[in-house]
């Protein structure tokens, strides 16, 4: 008899440590094959299908749609054909975690997959198992009575706890690594690292953060994981009760409660961090875009639908401007110096990954055009269209939604003229483009009507001063007003 296989939620890559289960694609009792999609999950980056590394009969689904799962938690149990259907405990063991590497299915999901083929995989180093994790020291017996457990129970509990702490991340920063010593201190003193804001680089939780939490007043957390799964009927009743409640502050009835998760959760964390950490300043200018629109109209007569869009031309001018003013194509990095001291560096890049804001049904995302400074306006236009399509379909990869060095935001599509945008952390600047409208404009001393737009640059005042920011903005504005001359130099 073959034991039921427990497939754990795999590492989704890019430091993503959790995902929301959107929908099951299989049911208990279904027969599935290797690489068959079994569920759709939504990460902070995109919606992806999770394929099964096993073939057999679905024995158990360990979660309900709408639940947020940590990487390494049981997702599905599969009984091989002819194997035992007896329900096995969903323990977190080295044998079940990444077992799919043995199958050789060849499938890859962002950060996990199997190497392909049907032969065994050769390894150059021993498999890392949870049994190899350094045992966590226990408190002295006199400090707190400990209920006796069997050696097997103690091993399972220790392994599960260590996995949970290993996967812990700092709020607002996915995948922050925490020192084993800090994790041990937190566990021994009862500090929940999942709700602790780190003071180190990129939100890293330091020893001092745990010590401060120990001294702070204790607030009993709500145990959500231990609560039984609510049945659909009870969920509806709970929702009805929530919506019929009255808000104590306003006295108004509460219409709904919407959990902040997925893309919205990530956007909220990044925006909050941007406003908290970056001393931003904003400059803006009105620009006569008549010449650029006329040039594009002439190109369209020759090329038709293959003519780049207005945003692609502006993007090309932006990349040229960043070569002239590279200070805006940087980011601030904080590192640990001597004990208790932090050092900051301005990191510059050899190239431009141009991000652009895209509104989707799942919220605002920022895909990035890699090495945009090496592309023509036509190539940038094609990549913008491609990335917009996959982002709105929820199929963009973490690599496509990250790694930008500067962001271009066309909020003119919403019918507005300007906006003091929030910098896309951890970048140093963002350029906004307003709608193009007819405005009275003075040309050669005479008043006329021109096509005018507003450019708004928000920048990190730590990386440059107003002179640099103003110079960059003026360069892009001049390129829009005199595109023929600038295009000839590109």
Image (cartoon, rainbow, N blue to C red):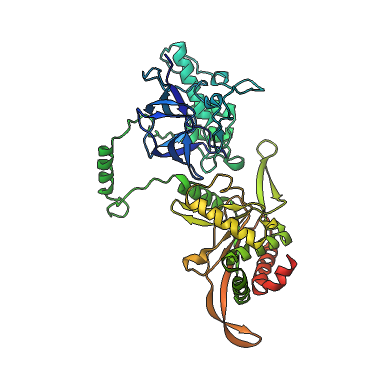
* Horizontal relation, residue 363 to residue 288: left or right: left
Please indicate whether residue 237 sits to the left or right of residue 266 in the image: left
The residue sitting at the right extreme is 489
Up the image or down, 345 lies above or below 26; here it is below
Q: Is the N terminus in the top left, top right, bottom left or bottom right quadrant? A: top left
Above or below for 210 versus 305? above
Which residue is outermost to the bottom?
446
Residue 199: % across, % down: 58, 40
Residue at (73, 69) in percent of width and height: 488
Q: Position of residue 305 (x, y in %)?
A: 56, 66
Residue nearest the observer in this picture, 69 or 122: 122
Q: In terms of image quadrants, where is residue 306? A: bottom right
Instruction: State the residue in front, 203 or 265.
Output: 265
The x, y position of residue 138, in whole percent, is 51, 18
Q: Quadrant of residue 459?
A: bottom right
Q: Is residue 188 visible?
A: no
Circle count: 0
Between residue 87 and residue 45, name the one nearer to us: 87
Quadrant, the C terminus? bottom right
Residue 452 located left or right of residue 265: right
Quadrant position of residue 407: bottom right
The percent position of residue 220, horizontal first and vertical second, equals 39, 33
Judge whether residue 25 can be spotted in this image. Answer: yes
């Amino acid at each position: 008899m073959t034991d039921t296989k427990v497939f754990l939620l795999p590492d989704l890559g890019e430091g993503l440590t959790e995902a929301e289960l959107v929908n099951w694609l299989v049911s208990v009792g279904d027969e599935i094959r290797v690489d068959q999609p079994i569920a759709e999950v939504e990460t902070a980056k995109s919606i992806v299908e999770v394929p099964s590394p096993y073939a057999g009969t679905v024995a158990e689904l360990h979660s309900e749609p709408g639940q947020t799962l940590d990487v390494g938690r049981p997702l599905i149990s599969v009984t091989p054909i002819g194997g035992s259907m007896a329900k096995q405990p969903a323990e977190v063991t080295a044998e079940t975690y990444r077992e799919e590497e043995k199958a050789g299915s060849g499938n890859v999901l962002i950060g996990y997959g199997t190497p392909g083929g049907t032969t065994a995989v050769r390894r150059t180093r021993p498999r890392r198992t949870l049994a190899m994790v350094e045992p966590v020291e226990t408190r002295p017996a006199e400090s707190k009575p400990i209920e006796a457990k069997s050696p097997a129970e103690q091993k399972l509990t220790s392994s599960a706890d260590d996995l949970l702490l290993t996967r812990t991340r700092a709020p607002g920063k996915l995948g922050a690594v925490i020192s084993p010593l800090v994790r041990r201190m937190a566990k021994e003193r009862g500090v929940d690292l999942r709700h602790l804001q780190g003071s180190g680089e990129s939100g890293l939780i330091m020893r001092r953060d745990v010590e401060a939490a120990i001294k702070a007043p204790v607030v009993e957390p709500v145990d959500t994981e231990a609560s039984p799964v609510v049945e659909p009927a009870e969920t509806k009743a709970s929702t009805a009760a929530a919506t019929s409640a009255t808000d104590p502050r306003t006295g108004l009835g509460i219409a709904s409660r919407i959990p902040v998760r997925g893309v919205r959760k990530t956007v909220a964390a990044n925006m909050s961090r941007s406003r908290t950490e970056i001393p931003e300043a904003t400059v803006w200018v009105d620009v006569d875009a008549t010449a650029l629109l006329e040039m594009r109209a002439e190109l369209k007569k020759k090329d038709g639908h293959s003519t780049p869009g207005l945003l692609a031309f502006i993007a090309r001018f932006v990349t040229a401007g960043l070569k002239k003013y590279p200070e805006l194509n940087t980011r601030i990095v904080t590192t640990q110096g001597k004990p208790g001291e932090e050092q900051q560096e301005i990191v510059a890049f050899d190239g431009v990954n141009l991000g652009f804001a895209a509104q989707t049904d799942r919220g605002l995302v920022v895909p990035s055009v890699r090495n945009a400074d090496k592309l023509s306006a036509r190539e940038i236009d094609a990549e913008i269209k491609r990335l917009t399509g996959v982002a709105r379909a929820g199929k963009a990869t973490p690599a496509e939604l990250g790694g930008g060095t500067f962001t271009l935001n066309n909020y003119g599509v919403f019918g507005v003229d300007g906006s003091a945008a929030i910098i896309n952390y951890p970048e140093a600047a963002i350029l906004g483009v307003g709608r193009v409208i007819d405005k009275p404009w003075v040309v050669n001393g005479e008043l006329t009507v021109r096509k005018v737009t507003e450019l708004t640059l928000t920048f990190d005042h730590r990386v440059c001063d107003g002179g640099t920011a103003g110079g960059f903005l003026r360069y892009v504005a001049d390129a829009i007003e005199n595109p023929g001359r600038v295009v000839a130099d590109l």
